[in-house]
Structures are given as structure tokens and as C-alpha cells.
Amino acid sequence: MSFHPVVRNPRSRHRAIAVSAMRSASITLGRPRLRVPLSRTASLGILPSRSFLSYSVNNRVKSDPAGRGGAEMGVYVVTGSASGMGAAVVEKLRSAGNTVIGVDLRSADVVADLSTATGRRAAIDGVLAASGGTLDGAVLAAGLGPAPGADRPALIVEVNYFGVVDLLEGWHDALASAERAKVVVFSSNSTTTMPAVPGRAIRAMLAGDSGKAVKATRLFGKNAPAMAYGASKIAVSRWVRRQAVTARWAGAGIRLNAIAPGAILTPLLERQLATPDEAKAIRSFPVPIGGFGVPSQLAEWVVFMLSDAADFLCGSVVFVDGGSDAWFRADDWPRAVPAVRIRGYLARMKEFAARA
Ligand code: NAD
């Protein structure tokens, strides 16, 4: 009997180094493919958080992060890993045997403040070092809700939009290296149920101008944080849909999708419920199914969106919101391409044909 632990992508020098550093190995027989999970821990001097490094290397690409059916495991990064839905995703992925690199302000493998460019750079580098250069998937759950405070709109823009886009750009090559990587970005059903969100703020974020985006929310006074929140989630969803279909992302085998939760009972929502005015507004908001969602339900959706079942999912925003979006927007989408936009539609057809 012989076995060769094949590095998922032999071009990945980091992964090759990781493999050579393995201390122990175990072999599972009895499946058509020989499975060789190997792991080790080591300390990472560059990280300010607890020392950690855990590799899980297989002889083929992973196929089922939920761990059903003994499929191979992967390496995932989850931002916002210390609380709420991010923590629930980490728990599900780890309990199925995957290696997870958590990123958060505290209690994480990579401690980084995503509200600053320096913090985002540290998160990118820390995760690349910890993963050995290949990521099977990324879950971007770090986010801030609309709380009062003059600096809140800026923090929301920085964390909810740039804390997703900058990180994914920084991890692009590591995701491409896995060949069938999946990305799940946390959007929100605020994208379709919050009225009068300023388009100028959305456009500014997509153009990379955080200052202009924050300025566009200021005229809303005490509602500025709510508007910044809605705008950040629309902008990040649009970024996902625009990028998902490009040669750079889809062409590299990376599936980019978003999940849009409704009200989910996490510390974020609990903080909002602690303010009487906000609690009243939240509890009176239409949820046809009733009540609130719970983090573990959403985590199941995310793990599903990271699995092989999502291989054909690209540029989708999956609403899991108890029916609020359908309540307000049932007839707004799906919607046929309007006749006035046929020229643009045909131009996109041509553009796609020219790509091939
Ligand atoms: P949560 O507050 O429980 O968790 C969010 C995590 O993000 C926290 O661990 C926090 O420390 C981290 N975070 C915040 N600012 C950060 C920063 N500057 N740097 C690094 N990490 C930072 O929230 P949650 O409810 O689990 O939310 C997860 C995602 O889902 C968020 O993007 C949120 O906007 C979105 N969402 C939540 C709800 C809801 O009702 N809970 C609804 C729709 C969308």
C-alpha cells in the first residue's frame, strides 16, 4: 500500500510548506479515494491573539463542509467569529472537522479591527499566514448594526462594506488556489425593506469613497446610522453580484454569494431591543412567519452555501427573513427586463460571447 498526500494546488508554495511541516498523519481507507487528513499546530508570532495554526490537508478538494458522509474537510475563514451568526458558523464548521480561522475584535484566531485600513491589512495577512495560502471558503459576518452615535455611520461603512470588500480582494488568490472556493457575505433584508436609502451613499461605497458615503447619510440626522446600515448592505450585495460573474471571480472558480437575514436573535439584535424605541419598531415590523430567527438556523444555510450543493450558485442573494421581503416586495422581483433596456441586455449578450 502506498499513499501520497497530494497538495490541493501544487502551485501553492505555502501549502507545500504546510504539508512538509506535518507532524502526524492518519489514513482512512474504504472509500474510492484514499483520504489522508493531516494536522499540526504551531505558533504564529505575527498574530497578537492566542498562538494557533491548524492545517487540514487532503488529497483532493473538499466536498462537504457539514461533514455529512465522511467527505473531505477544508480550511475556512470566518469574520465576526466571536459572536452571533459568525460564531454559530464557526461552531458548525469546526464540529464537522474543518479548520476555521476566526477573525474578530477579540476572542479570535486573528484579532483585527476591520474599521481601519491597517486592521484590515492585518486581518488579510494573518489569515493568509494561518491558512498556508489556500482557502476553501470565506464567510464575512463581521458587522455593526445601526446604533446611535456621531461616529457610527463611518464605522458601519468601514466594517460592513470595506471590511468585506478589502478582505476578499486580499484573499482572492488564496480562494482561487482552492479551485472551487465558496464565499458567503452577510447582507441583510434591510436591502429591500428599508425605504429611502440614499443612492449617493451606495454609489460612493462602490467607488471606494468612504468619506463621501458617510457625508451622504448625514442629512438624515438621527437616522444617519440606519441609512448608513441600509446603504452598506445594498452596496456590499451589489459588489457581490457585480464581481461574482466576472472572469476574475467566477473564472477562478470562486462562488461569490450573499445571505440576507431578517431579524435574528443575536447580541446585535439584543442590543437594539434594549432601546425601547428601537424595540417597538423591531417588534412591530412585519414578519409573516412570526418571531425572530436564531443564529444556528442561519449557520445551516451558510454551511450549505459553502458545500458542493452550491457549486452552481453564483451572484445570488439568499433571503432568510421570515417573509418580510416578500411581504413588502412580492411583485417587485423577479421581473422581466423592461423593453427600454433591451439594448443594454443585448450588449451584455455580446460581451459574454466575446469572453469565450
Ligand atoms: P453580532 O454583533 O452578534 O456579531 C458581529 C461580530 O462582528 C461581533 O463579534 C463583533 O465583534 C464583530 N465586529 C464588529 N465590528 C468589528 C470590527 N471593527 N472588527 C472586527 N470585528 C468586528 O452580530 P450578528 O447579528 O451575528 O451579525 C452578523 C452579520 O449579520 C452582520 O453583518 C449583521 O449586519 C448581519 N445581520 C444581522 C441581522 C440580525 O438581526 N442579527 C440581520 C441582518 C443582517
Image (cartoon, grey):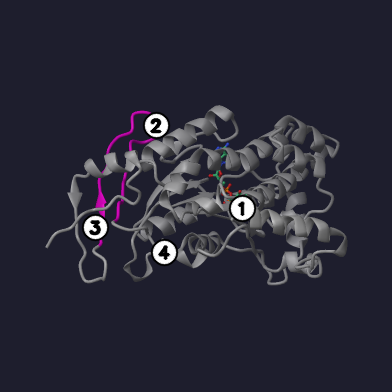
Query: Which residue bears the numbered disc 2?
Result: 47
Above or below, 22 relative to 328? above
Amino acid type for the residue under numbered disc 2: Leu
Query: Which residue bears the numbered disc 3?
Result: 36
Q: Residue furthest left?
A: 1
Q: Cα distance, mark 4 to mark 2?
A: 28 Å
Q: Which residues are magenta?
A: 35-58
Q: Are marks 3 and 2 in contact (CB under 8 Å)?
A: no
Is residue 232 found inside the magenta-colored segment of the image? Answer: no
Is residue 53 found inside the magenta-colored segment of the image? Answer: yes
Above or below, 64 relative to 205? below
Q: Cα distance, mark 1 to mark 2?
A: 42 Å
- In front of the other: label 3 or label 4? 3
Q: Earlier in the sequence, mark 3 or mark 2?
A: 3
Q: Cα distance, mark 3 to mark 4?
A: 18 Å
Structural crowding at the residue carrying mark 2, measured as other residues with C-alpha within 10 Å and reported as few (<14), some (14–19) or many (≥20): many
| Side of 247 relative to 125 (left or right) | right
Nearer to us in this view, 155 or 124 = 124
Which x, y percent locates residue 260? 64, 58
Query: Which residue bears the numbered disc 4?
Result: 66
- In front of the other: label 3 or label 2? 3
Nearer to us in this view, 186 or 16 = 16
Q: Earlier in the sequence, mark 1 or mark 2?
A: 2
Query: Which residue bears the numbered disc 1?
Result: 355
Is residue 53 visible in the rendered image? The answer is no
Q: Cα distance, mark 4 to mark 1?
A: 35 Å
Q: Earlier in the sequence, mark 4 or mark 1?
A: 4
| Res 34 quadrant in image | bottom left
